[in-house]
Amino acid sequence: MAKRTSLLSSVAAAAVLLAAAAGGALSADLGETAQASTNGTLAATAGCGKAPTLSSGTRTISSGGQNRSYILRIPDGYDRNHPYRLIFGFHWLNGSANNVASAGYYGLLPLSNNSTIFVAPQGIDNGWANTNGRDLTLFDDISRQIENDLCVDTSQRFALGWSYGGAMSYAVACARPNVVRAVTVISGANLSGCNGGTQPVAYFGIHGIYDSVLNISMGRSLRDTFVRNNGCTAQSPREPSRGSLTHITTTYSGCREGYPVQWAAFDGDHTPSPVDGSSSPNDSRTWTSGEIWRFFSQFASTTPPTTAPPTSVPPTTPPVTTAPPTTPPVTTPPPGEPGACTATYRTVNTWPGGFQAEVTVANNGATTLNGWTVRLTLASGQAISSLWNGVNTGTSGSVSVRNADYNGTVGANGSTTFGFTATGNGATVPSGVSCTSP
């Protein structure tokens, strides 16, 4: 594997110098044009509808007063009226753009099914020192050149890389949060700087538990930046034991809607291509490309909600009339008896990394209900982020919701509702939905 030749010693020797160099001030005006036009919203780039002049292959570009280069891969059968996903793949120290391209952009190219424009930039001295922000400038300039010529979905820009390339992806996430939708950092550290680093970006970190070049603690530190920025619940994810030859992927709970944080620790050293059940890395057998592709492709071409629904008034989102409730109501006691209470769950809306749900509490009895409590068990990875028209105990796993002060009285054959937004996959409905009344 050419990518690992002499890499361990060269990265270890350079890491301290790189970290110091990356601390230099970055230009405040980098990427202002690109940032001002996005903020995660689908928009047609200037290249949409135009006959392209760019083609797949090595391209040159003037950036920051220097001649730089990158390798471009345009989908087969490119449609100038179709907005495409855009992925930047940054190479490792002493690697090259050609290495990234020849390895299928970290294995994502064969998974993309011609849905994605890929870019592999070339670093100066085969690295990403990002001195005075020069590599962020390159990212901006390449993005601008591509989007002026090709049709790009501005809500579908991503970056990833291994080692030094992971450090550069982290720098992009810190400095361009309104440009990239998500990043993946494989075995990275803060080597290319973090200008900004306070805004949410969907983040996936991958790291070996006994990385001898960039200790896993460095990867955890990068991850925790976006655990904080994305409003996730702090935790210490499980990691595999030495000798297990496995990996464990954790999706954080409590994150801001549409901004998940995912962490995968594997039993291995400094490599971009670990293989479960083997101590020998292998680009064609690694699990990383599949998990990275799933992480990136979960984001639809829409902007996730930026504000939670009000706590006293139900949201105005109309119900989905084409999908009937997938969880049958659970009645305790049977309908018709005094105080009978049923709870019916339905998914109202979904978006990448989150969903909105509503529960109808109905009184099927002959007398008035005076107070009610609904219990349900959320699926793994789901967590309530906001709830209205009720008071919840718990946000994940087994959750109970009792009535608010103003909707506890429900007349015979009457009903009321409460709703909530949650992180996680809304396709999986909660189990054990039940309702009781004092």
Image (cartoon, rainbow, N blue to C red):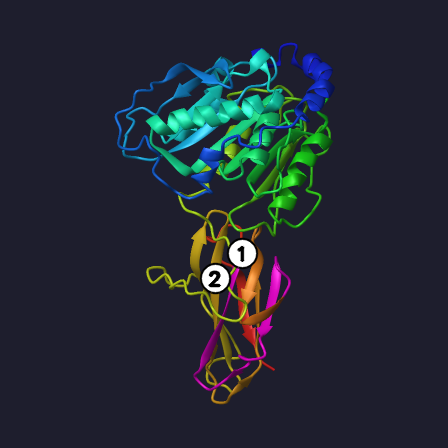
Mark 1 element type = strand
Image coordinates for residue 22, horizontal then vertical, percent = 66, 24
Q: Amino acid at mark 2?
A: Ala
Residue 79 in magenta stretch: no
The residue located at (52%, 25%) in the rendering is 137
Mark 2 element type = strand
Tag 1 residue: 422
Q: Nearer the viewer, residue 244 or 370?
A: 370
The alpha-carbon separation of the residues under discs 1 and 2 comes to 8 Å
Tag 2 residue: 357
Q: Going by the image, does 414 lie left or right of 385?
A: left
Q: Nearer the viewer, residue 56 or 67?
A: 67
Q: Is residue 240 above or below residue 395?
A: above
The residue located at (38%, 64%) in the rendering is 319
Q: Going by the image, does 140 lie left or right of 189?
A: left
Q: Is residue 101 above or below residue 348?
A: above
* Quarter of the image where the C terminus is located: bottom right
Is residue 74 visible in the rendered image? The answer is: yes
* Quarter of the image where the N terminus is located: top right
Image coordinates for residue 80, horizontal then vertical, percent = 28, 30
Q: Residues within 10 Å of mark 1 (few under 14, many from 20)?
A: many
Number of the label disc, if any, that sits on residue 64:
none
Magenta-highlighted residues: 393-421
Whichever of callouts 1 and 2 sits on the residue coming sooner in the sequence is 2
Image coordinates for residue 223, horizontal then vertical, percent = 65, 37
In the displayed orientation, state which residue is furthest to the bottom.
367
Label 1–label 2 contact, CB within 8 A: yes
Image coordinates for residue 284, horizontal then vertical, percent = 50, 21
